[in-house]
Image: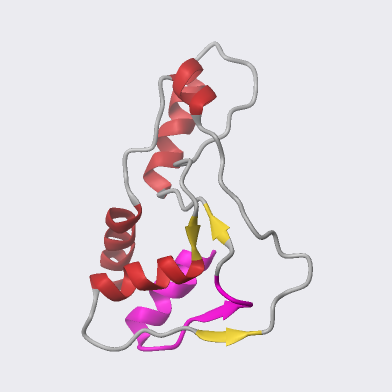
Amino acid sequence: GVVAIFCGKLVEGGTPIAFGDGLQTRDYTFVDDIVSANLAAAGSSWEGACNVGTGTETTVLELAAALQELDGSRPFELEHAPERPGEVRRSAVDPSLAREVLGWEAGVGLSEGLRRTLATLRD
């Protein structure tokens, strides 16, 4: 996904690419939170579907800025490419059902998740 690509570009000294204006949003959820949600579901009697995420929309521009803030050692400016046809403009989930039926909610914020991701790529 875009987080892995952008983190890789930051570590390598590359230039991240934003398709379109970079204002499209996603609900970036750290992998440890996804794992804990799956474990909560496995230990639950709930049989329905639940949205798992932070419930927070973050733009591609904000993602790049958060990475720049974590490692200001070199410029990390987006290159803009043409918008991809059919790309979803806004995406974020409502995790309230997961909180209610699984007792789960995301615990790792964007900045901390990015910091942890970068640390694994640098090791």
| Colouring chosen for the image of the structure | secondary structure
Would residue 39 appear left or right of 23 to someone viewing this image? left
Q: Is residue 105 magenta?
A: no
The front one of 9 and 111 is 111
Would residue 105 appear left or right of 84 to someone viewing this image? left
Examine the rendering and report whether any part of residue 55 can be seen: yes
Residue at the image point whose x is 71% and y is 65% from the top: 87
Would residue 82 appear left or right of 115 to someone viewing this image? right
Residue at the image point whose x is 65% and y is 20% from the top: 48
Would residue 67 appear left or right of 46 to someone viewing this image? left
Q: Is residue 90 above or below residue 45?
A: below
Residue at far right of view: 85
Residue at the image point whose x is 57% and y is 34% from the top: 51
Q: Is residue 10 above or below residue 70?
A: below
Query: Where in the figure is residue 29, as x and y percent of width and height?
Result: 44, 48
Magenta span covers which residues? 1-22
Residue at far top of view: 45
The front one of 99 and 30 is 99
